[in-house]
Image (cartoon, rainbow, N blue to C red):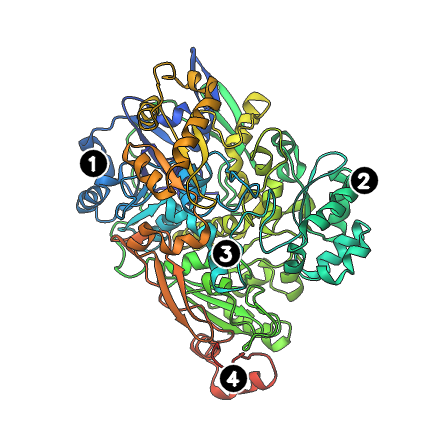
């Protein structure tokens, strides 16, 4: 089997982890990736844990995982880099944003077919462009920290590496789209803007039911309850119960019938008002069995519960071993395990065992001669995916986010729903008029798509869907595992209609746990991330309302597009099964690797293994907080001078670690005397990574996002105007415009069925009369 990116040449620059993960995606799929390391040492190689690579030398295991399959070249002279870039297909530029635009211009002049990814913490323009970045500061500014943790604070943050994964995925998707369209494009991708994609559910709450932007407590998130992590007789159980049928099954399983029938607890919103009362009953019942025993019962009853594993348990779970979810990584004499790329292409999978280079290893080997299958000339000036058509049968968050990424890049997304069973994110309130059209979440996730309402459970409707399969390049779905085969729309059936079609399914789990019902929170529960979040003496802590959903969507876009690029180059379709739990594992990579290398994991809470101070500190604002990360001794000296602390005895990391409590008290006194934005400005003025812990609703007025034009107010029939966050990749310094508002149900029936299938007015009228197609309408929103 030929890897899908074989033949492409990629140059990777800079110390940004997101750039390194983007490069890993390329290298693990077969591209020749040349990483350029600075002469004075690569900062990524200092990330713990370190492994013995032989000859008395050590290297970073985490950096090795990021660098699997790459070659390393030492040398950062601009002329030398320009010469390499001149014969590359892609450059991943994680260097300083200050000169990024000039570098793009210079490189494109020398190599018009080059695709350039310029990655930075905050982008190249706007008030934060010169800010120092850190994972904590950026996620705080993106609204991803404020709602996690105890009511009185401080908010809890997972201390590193999260933004590298989803930003790397975002950049990779843009690059593969460019290659699909012929190359010759330059993208700007910021970590901050990539992070905000994960905040969109909470952002949309401003335009839906009244939102509560206060912390509700550890493992508590509005608007779903019960959603949390509970101790059992042994182990921890992650619970997410949404719909009334799940609440009934959960109460029956725990013998809580008196709670189930209480009229106060009939909706998730009602239950959210009585968390403490219900928590007490749940906690009492769950201690009767182990987490494994409860999970076995829940799996049989299809209740969305899962064991919350620590890293040792996660590495031993057979459901992941059977899937090949862990990759063997070798560097020098050392060998350990990390997560395999979750983009599981059936015919062209990523590597599962790979060697990472030592500094300079393989870097002097010349580029291989061209095989003639990579672009020789730049693509068109239109959007990169123009001409690509995808049949979207997905619902909710993950699948629609995957197709929205591709729609933003120009793909024609044909979304198919049914009037009686629409996308489950359409309904907002049964009393709404019109029904199915006021959900702000649907509006946020389905822009730039066309929509047909076709009842595929009727023979005539199923026949229409099958005909559409013959007219598209790919099909994506995220139904329960038995639905597509039952409809006769499994991959074998689709391939019989369209031999080169790419099909992507997005189950929560595969294999022995394929029947598990899951939400985005269930996927985080099962990923091991909660076990490394929060204080060492506290419970596992959930980081996000539904982490797994946006992460699944970002991986879904990347995997589907990789398969489509392979199809364009070879004519071969294939089946892509994206396990959404596996998509979460790269977020836990640092701790999975630590477990594999050392046999255990140290939990730091808001502190950090290599930065002191690091954490969330109070400000003068009401429930105001700021995330601060001090990355090195030079920045520590700048901070100590700013807050008036004698740093003469605290010049090293070890000395600061010993005095961490004292340093944090002094820093808290300083931040508490200032508003968050004022404190951020003073700290950033000294080169110290700091970010205000923003509530999601604060982002609409964030000066940086406003200055960069990230908010696009879009008028939509029935639901009015809603500002939509721009795609997290941009060309020529401008965000892609939203071309179409999210469709109303069946809005494009005629456009699709006549324009693609050629059905005339008589046929369309008959289908509507028979209830096979339809629309729902009504008066304007009052």
- Front of the two marks 4 and 2: 2
Q: Earlier in the sequence, mark 4 or mark 3?
A: 3
**Residue that badge 2 annotates:** 288
- Front of the two marks 3 and 1: 3
Q: Secondary structure at mark 4?
A: helix
Which x, y percent locates residue 299? Answer: 73, 48
Toward the viewer: 393 or 375?
Answer: 393
Which x, y percent locates residue 637? Answer: 32, 23
**Residue that badge 1 annotates:** 82
Q: Earlier in the sequence, mark 1 or mark 2?
A: 1
Q: Earlier in the sequence, mark 3 or mark 2?
A: 3
- The reply to whether discs 3 and 1 touch (Cβ–Cβ < 8 Å) is no
- The reply to whether discs 1 and 2 touch (Cβ–Cβ < 8 Å) is no
- Front of the two marks 1 and 2: 2
Q: Secondary structure at mark 3?
A: helix
Toward the viewer: 422 or 276?
Answer: 276
Q: Residue at x 56, y 34 (%)?
A: 534
């Amino acid at each position: 089997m030929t890897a899908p990116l074989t033949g492409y040449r990629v140059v990777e620059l800079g110390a940004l982890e997101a750039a390194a993960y983007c490069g890993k995606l390329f290298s693990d799929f077969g591209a020749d990736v040349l990483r350029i390391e600075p002469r004075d040492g690569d900062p990524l190689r200092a990330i713990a844990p370190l492994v013995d690579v032989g000859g008395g030398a050590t290297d970073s295991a985490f950096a090795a995982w990021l660098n699997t399959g790459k070659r390393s070249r030492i040398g950062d002279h601009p002329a030398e880099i320009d010469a390499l870039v001149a014969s590359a297909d892609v450059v991943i530029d994680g260097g300083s944003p200050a000169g990024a635009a000039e570098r793009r211009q210079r490189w494109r002049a020398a190599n018009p077919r080059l695709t350039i990814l310029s990655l930075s913490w905050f982008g190249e323009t706007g008030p934060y462009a010169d800010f120092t970045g850190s994972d904590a500061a950026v996620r705080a500014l993106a609204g991803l920290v404020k709602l996690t943790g105890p009511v009185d604070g401080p908010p809890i943050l997972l201390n590193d590496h999260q933004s590298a994964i989803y930003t790397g995925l975002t950049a990779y998707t843009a690059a593969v789209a460019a290659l699909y369209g012929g190359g010759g494009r330059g993208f700007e991708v910021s970590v901050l803007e990539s992070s905000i994609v994960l905040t969109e559910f909470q952002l949309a709450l401003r335009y839906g039911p009244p939102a509560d932007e206060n912390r509700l407590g550890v493992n508590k998130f509005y608007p779903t309850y019960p959603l949390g992590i509970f101790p059992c007789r042994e182990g921890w159980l992650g619970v997410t119960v949404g719909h009334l049928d799940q609440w009934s099954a959960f109460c029956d399983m725990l013998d809580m019938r008196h709670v189930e029938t209480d009229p106060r607890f009939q909706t998730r919103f009602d239950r959210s008002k009585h968390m403490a009362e219900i928590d007490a009953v749940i906690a009492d019942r769950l201690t009767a069995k182990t987490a494994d025993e409860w999970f076995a019962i829940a799996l049989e009853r299809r209740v969305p519960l899962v064991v919350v594993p620590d890293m040792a348990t996660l590495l031993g779970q057979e459901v992941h071993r059977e899937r090949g979810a862990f990759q063997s990584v070798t560097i020098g004499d050392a060998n350990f395990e990390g997560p395999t790329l979750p983009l599981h292409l059936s015919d062209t999978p990523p590597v599962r065992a790979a060697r990472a280079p030592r500094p300079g290893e393989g870097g002097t080997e010349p580029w291989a001669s061209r095989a003639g299958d990579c672009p020789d000339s730049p693509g068109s000036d239109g959007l990169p995916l123009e001409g690509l058509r995808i049949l979207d049968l997905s619902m909710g968050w993950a699948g629609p986010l995957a197709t929205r990424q591709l729609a933003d890049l120009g793909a024609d997304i044909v979304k198919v729903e049914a009037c009686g069973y629409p996308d489950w994110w359409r309904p907002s309130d049964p009393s709404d008029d019109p029904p199915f059209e006021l959900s702000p979440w649907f509006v946020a996730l389905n822009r730039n798509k066309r929509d047909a309402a076709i009842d595929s459970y009727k023979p005539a409707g199923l026949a229409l869907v099958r005909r559409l399969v013959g007219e598209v390049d790919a099909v994506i779905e995220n139904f329960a595992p038995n639905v597509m085969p039952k409809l006769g729309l499994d991959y074998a059936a689709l391939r019989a209609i369209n031999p080169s079609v790419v099909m992507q399914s997005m189950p929560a789990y595969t294999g022995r746990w394929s029947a598990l019902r899951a939400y985005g929170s269930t996927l985080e529960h099962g990923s091991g991330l909660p076990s490394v979040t929060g204080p060492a003496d506290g419970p596992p802590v959930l980081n996000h309302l539904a982490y797994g959903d946006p992460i699944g969507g970002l991986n879904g876009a990347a995997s589907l597009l990789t398969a489509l690029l392979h199809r364009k180059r070879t004519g071969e379709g294939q089946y892509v099964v994206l396990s959404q739990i596996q998509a979460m594992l790269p977020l836990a990579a640092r701790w999975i690797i630590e477990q594999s290398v050392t046999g255990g994991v140290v939990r730091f809470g808001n502190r950090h293994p290599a930065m002191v101070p690091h954490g969330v500190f109070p400000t003068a604002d009401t429930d105001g907080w700021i995330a601060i990360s001090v990355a090195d001794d030079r920045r520590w000296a700048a901070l100590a001078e700013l807050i008036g602390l004698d740093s003469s005895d605290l010049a090293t990391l070890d000395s600061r670690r010993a005095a961490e409590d004292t340093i944090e008290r002094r820093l808290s006194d300083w931040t508490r005397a200032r508003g968050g934005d004022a404190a951020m400005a003073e700290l950033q003025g000294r080169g110290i990574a700091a970010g205000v812990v923003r509530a999601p609703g604060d982002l609409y007025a964030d000066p940086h996002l406003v200055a960069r034009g990230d908010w696009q107010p879009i008028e939509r029939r029935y639901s009015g105007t809603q500002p939509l966050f721009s795609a997290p990749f941009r060309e020529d310094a401008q965000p892609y415009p939203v071309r179409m508002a999210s469709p109303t149900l069946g809005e494009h029936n005629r456009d699709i069925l006549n324009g693609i299938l050629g059905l005339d007015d008589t046929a369309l009228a008959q289908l509507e009369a028979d209830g096979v197609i339809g629309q729902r309408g009504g008066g304007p929103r009052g």
